[in-house]
Amino acid sequence: MSNHDETPENRLRRELPEEVRASARGAVNAPETVDLPGGGPAELTGRQRLAKSLWPPRVSRAQLIVALLLSGLGFGLAVQVASNSDSDTALRGARQEDLVRILDELDDRTQRLEDEKQGLEKQRAELENSSNQAEEARRQTVEKEGQLGILAGTVAARGPGITITIDDTKGTVEANMLLDAIQELRAAGAEAMQVNGVRVVAGTYLSDAGDAVGVDGNKIKAPYRLKVIGKPQDLEPALNIPGGVVQTLEKEQATVTIERSDKIVVDALRAAKQPDYARSSSR
């Protein structure tokens, strides 16, 4: 055979020592073995070699971090799905008249916001079109001052509304339950309210005080009596929605009575507080 026909493989074999070639052939052809308890070697099957390569697992730090992040994301998604499922289940279990009532309440809230928007647009138009804009501005300022006085609790108010009486003979009604009632009434359009002779305003806070409830630091005891001015057709259904204020209080064995009236008087007043630092920018 000529040198031109000699392949690189044959040339490498010719140049290697005999013992190196023998050991290389043995390494390539020898099957993987494992020692048996009796001392004799046994050849591994394909399934055993696969299991040996997979265990113990070789996990890098980056893979571990990614696994932890994916676990946290999966847990968050599971909690969100469970929360949504609970809400859907509560609505699915409600009666048809309760669903209609909830829908009507949402429509009423939307209508109140639309009415407020139209009122503000009307005031702007009156200011822009009035021949005596200064006088019109003063009139609107006086009117706005009365409205803000009602909201701040510095002036008495009267109008249609409801009276809510909560009789708590078991002493189970807590401050957070009364706060839920107040918040629900505000969302339903309540314009003025008082509870047991204490005026409720935007900054009112409630706290538990032993066998009583503290309202802005004033201790009140059951029965709790709320006088609320607003549209009775909106206020009462807001308290009676499924899972709402009335059902929560009744679960605590409290008795809730709601009475509608064309004339509710909210006469509990709060002292006007003068700001220490703020001054009108118009002066």
Image (cartoon, helix red, strand yellow):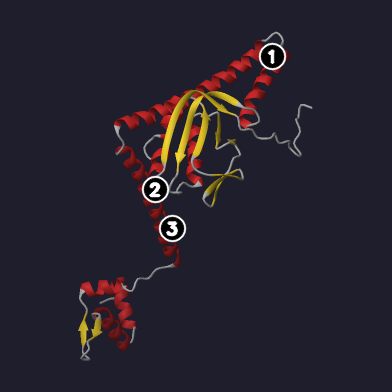
User: From what the image shows, is residue 78 above or below residue 184?
Assistant: below
Q: Is residue 219 visible?
A: yes
The front one of 187 and 199 is 199
Give the mark nearest the N terminus, 3 or 2: 3
**Could you classify mark 1 by the number of other residues whose Cα lies within 10 Å: few (under 14), some (14-19), or many (20 or more)?**
some
Q: Which residue is mark 2?
A: 80
Residue type for callout 3: Leu
Helix, strand or loop at disc 3?
Answer: helix
From the image, state whether disc 2 or disc 1 is nearer to you: 1
Give the mark nearest the N terminus, 2 or 1: 2
User: From what the image shows, is residue 38 above or below residue 46?
Assistant: below
Helix, strand or loop at disc 2?
Answer: helix
**Could you classify mark 3 by the number of other residues whose Cα lies within 10 Å: few (under 14), some (14-19), or many (20 or more)?**
few
User: From what the image shows, is residue 1 above or below residue 134?
Assistant: below
- Name the quadrant of the C terminus: top right
Q: Residue at x 70, y 8 (%)?
A: 131
Q: Which residue is mark 3?
A: 69
Q: Which residue is mark 1?
A: 136
Q: Residue at x 33, y 41 (%)?
A: 90
Q: Residue 114: x and y, percent?
A: 50, 22
Q: Residue 197: x and y, percent?
A: 58, 36
Q: CA distance from mark 3 to mark 2?
A: 17 Å
From the image, state whether disc 3 or disc 1 is nearer to you: 1
Total labels: the figure holds 3
Give the mark nearest the N terminus, 3 or 1: 3
State which quadrant residue 18 falls in. bottom left
Q: Residue at x 52, y 21 (%)?
A: 115
Residue type for callout 1: Glu
Residue type for callout 2: Gln
User: From what the image shows, is residue 72 above or below residue 110?
Assistant: below
**Mark 3–mark 1 CB contact (< 8 Å):** no
- Name the quadrant of the N terminus: bottom left
